[in-house]
């Protein structure tokens, strides 16, 4: 018999009526011939209240006791849910994370799942019970209660669906599904029918996600179809699955990350080790770095710009001071009033002109672009915060995101029978079920790079450059824009070696036209891509990559990071060595 996992978030179990409504959904699924596992969150804002209560008795409560406290929220919900189902004349059993056998590590308040035993769940299901699992919690080796981090019930639900080989995981929440952008910010946002795991991972990390990032990583790892639905209405919801909504659409979502800060460093030596040291120092302070842009060295020194949450700007600056001192480098500029606009789309990788279309849209409002980063399925720009909402609106409409795409992907998401789940689970047992999995380390030596210094950083000027390149038929892969000053930026991009001549002549003309600075060309680069699952939640991947290169004294030319991939560019002659180094670094994470 097939198993279905249904997860109900806090608002969907906020009061007795809603608990009864959720119970009816589960009973209905059982009557339709499914074995049903429910995963429930704490009622309403209960977790927030418990956190508030804790802070009243202790400003810095011990993490172990915090978990002890917070896990009670879910325990209340599962018991009530079981009673509700019983009142309808059906069999139900509630279980805590420990009773299910969700083993985690001991990092209280942000524990990771290591293993899940399924025997008891299976037995209860065979006996005709609806099993109700407490979300968000587990136990460590010593039977201490742990929690998985805020929003962690999603992860419990998808993890249970994975190990039980459920046919799907339904997420019942208080919104209708996944939108093209946050509908609270932009009313014209559209509910999407389907979104791919990779797109969802990028979007979730941009704060646009309805779901916990780690749950999407799980779903991808085990190919679990996720169905996000509103528990209060009968809307069709959105499916999260391997394929995007439409094969033809280049862009499927846009997001605004409002409170960012940019830090620009200058006069750094061109060694991967320096970059490694800087990001190591930052991550030691538990600050997550978002965009990273390193410009190609002109005089042997390097400029590095990166963004962090605005609230963490000062601690970041403090953390890197000693390193800057050692290398005689300095902070050139900081801006705490910036926001990031990103577009995401699985179709972006094989379409030309997407970047240019975005820059042209922004040019309509003469919006300065301080930084640009690209990945295979995402393009992000940093703009002044005062212009960010306008920028999001322009971008959303320029890709027609408010309209349903004409050709929708026809899929019937089913778990992939070809994935040998037993084998995957066995391997994951070694790296830990939530471990970082690197599935590919690629090297591409077919490209060259061009850097144009001192380009006006108005969207209009940037759009012109990529328009002229597109008109010349030049295919652009990576783009990075690093901050120079208020009005100027350095722009680097990569192109196929075969188009280098053409690209140089277009760049030269452009340089005349806009009175830019000098042009630097590297006629052979190696682009190394580390891709896998867990890059989002295992923040050390970029640092590890830098470390691998630093150990062999290989200089870094460009850096691009995303949720599913870390890309670094090194001079072409280092291709083989760099690949070996990175492979060695990630040996234990390969699947
Ligand atoms: N109750 C927990 C929270 O509020 C877990 C969850 O709802 O997913 O974060
Ligand atoms: Mg949630």
Image (cartoon, rainbow, N blue to C red):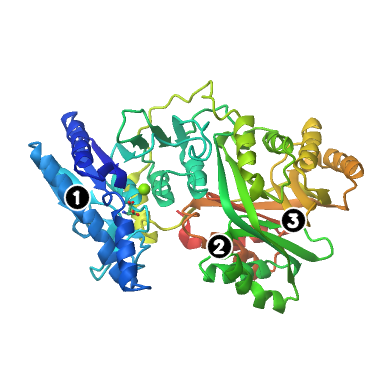
Mark 3–mark 2 Cα distance, whole angstroms, equals 21 Å
Instruction: Tell me the mark number nearer the camera, choosing from 3 and 2.
Output: 2
Q: Secondary structure at mark 3?
A: strand
Q: Marks 2 and 3: in contact by CB < 8 Å? A: no
Residue placed furthest toward the front:
56
Residue that carries the numbered disc 1 in the rendered image:
78
User: Where, by quadrant of the figure, is residue 468 drawn?
Assistant: top right
Residue placed furthest toward the right:
512
Residue that carries the numbered disc 3 in the rendered image:
483
Left or right: 326 as drawn, with respect to 419: right
Rendered location of residue 567, percent (x, y): 62, 52
Q: Secondary structure at mark 2?
A: helix
Can residue 588 be seen from the camera position used here?
A: yes
Q: Residue at x 32, y 51 (%)?
A: 153
Residue that carries the numbered disc 2 in the rendered image:
311
Rendered location of residue 172, percent (x, y): 31, 39
Q: Earlier in the sequence, mark 3 or mark 2?
A: 2
Left or right: 505 as drawn, with respect to 322: right
The crowding category of the residue bearing disc 2, from other C-alpha atoms within 10 Å (few below 14, some 14 to 19, many at least 20), is few
Rendered location of residue 398, percent (x, y): 64, 31
User: Where, by quadrant of the figure, is residue 164 drawn?
Assistant: top left
The crowding category of the residue bearing disc 3, from other C-alpha atoms within 10 Å (few below 14, some 14 to 19, many at least 20), is many
Residue 325, placed above or below residue 164: below
Q: Residue at x 59, y 60 (%)?
A: 308
- Which numbered dot is residue 361? none
Q: Residue at x 36, y 40 (%)?
A: 224
Q: Marks 3 and 1: in contact by CB < 8 Å? A: no
Residue 325, placed above or below residue 368: below
Q: Is mark 1 within 8 Å of ligand 1?
A: no
User: Where, by quadrant of the figure, is residue 410 drawn?
Assistant: top left
Mark 1–mark 3 Cα distance, whole angstroms, equals 52 Å
Rendered location of residue 279, percent (x, y): 60, 66
């Amino acid at each position: 018999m097939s198993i279905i996992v249904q997860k109900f978030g806090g608002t969907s179990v906020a009061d007795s009526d809603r608990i009864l409504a959720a119970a009816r959904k589960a009973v209905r699924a059982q009557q339709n011939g499914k074995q049903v596992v429910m995963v429930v969150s704490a009622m309403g804002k209960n977790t927030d209240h418990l956190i508030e209560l804790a802070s009243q008795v202790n400003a810095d409560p011990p993490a172990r006791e915090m978990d002890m406290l917070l896990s009670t929220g879910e325990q209340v919900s599962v018991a009530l849910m079981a009673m509700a189902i019983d009142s309808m004349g059906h069999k139900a059993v509630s279980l805590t994370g420990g009773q299910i056998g969700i083993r985690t590590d001991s990092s209280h308040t942000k524990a990771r799942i290591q293993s899940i035993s399924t025997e008891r769940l299976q037995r209860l299901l065979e006996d005709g019970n609806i099993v109700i699992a407490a979300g968000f919690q587990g136990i460590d080796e010593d039977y201490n209660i742990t929690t998985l981090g805020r929003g962690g019930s999603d992860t419990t639900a998808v993890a249970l669906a994975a190990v039980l080989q459920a046919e799907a995981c339904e997420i019942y929440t208080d919104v209708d599904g996944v939108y093209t952008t946050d509908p609270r910010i932009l009313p014209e946002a559209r509910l999407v029918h389907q979104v791919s795991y990779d797109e969802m991972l990028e979007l979730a990390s941009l704060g646009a996600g309805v779901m916990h990032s780690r749950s999407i990583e799980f779903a991808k790892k085990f190919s679990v179809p996720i169905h996000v639905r509103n528990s209060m209405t009968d809307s069709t919801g959105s499916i999260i699955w391997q394929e995007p909504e439409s094969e033809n659409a280049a862009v499927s979502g846009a997001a605004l990350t409002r409170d960012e800060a940019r830090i620009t460093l200058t006069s750094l030596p061109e060694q991967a080790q320096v970059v490694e040291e800087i990001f190591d120092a930052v991550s030691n302070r538990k600050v997550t770095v978002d965009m990273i842009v390193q410009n190609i060295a002109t005089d042997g020194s390097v400029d590095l710009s990166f963004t962090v949450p605005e609230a963490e700007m000062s601690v970041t600056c403090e953390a890197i001071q000693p390193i800057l001192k050692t290398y005689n480098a300095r902070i050139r500029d900081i801006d705490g009033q910036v926001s990031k606009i990103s577009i995401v789309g699985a179709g972006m990788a094989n379409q030309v002109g997407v970047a240019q279309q975005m820059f042209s849209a922004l040019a309509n409002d003469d919006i300065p672009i301080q930084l640009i980063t690209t990945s295979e399925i995402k393009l992000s720009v940093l703009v002044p915060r005062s212009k960010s909402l306008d920028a999001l609106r322009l971008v959303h409409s320029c890709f027609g995101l408010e309209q349903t795409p004409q050709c929708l992907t026809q899929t019937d998401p089913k778990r992939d029978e070809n994935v040998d789940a037993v084998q995957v689970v066995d391997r994951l047992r070694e790296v830990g079920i939530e471990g970082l999995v690197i599935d590919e380390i690629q090297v591409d030596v077919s490209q060259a790079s061009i850097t144009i210094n001192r380009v006006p950083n108005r969207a209009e000027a940037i759009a012109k450059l990529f328009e002229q390149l597109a008109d010349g038929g030049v295919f652009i892969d990576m783009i990075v824009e690093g901050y120079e000053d208020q009005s100027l930026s350095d722009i680097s991009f990569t192109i196929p070696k075969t188009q280098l001549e053409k690209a140089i002549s277009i760049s030269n003309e452009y340089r005349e036209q806009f009175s830019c600075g000098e042009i630097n060309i590297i006629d052979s680069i190696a682009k190394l891509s580390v891709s896998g699952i867990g890059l989002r939640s295992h923040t050390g991947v970029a640092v590890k990559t830098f470390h691998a290169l630093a150990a062999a004294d290989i200089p870094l030319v460009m850096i691009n990071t995303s949720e599913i991939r870390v890309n670094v560019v090194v001079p072409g002659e280092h291709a083989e060595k760099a690949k070996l180094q990175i492979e060695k670094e990630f040996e234990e994470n390969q699947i």
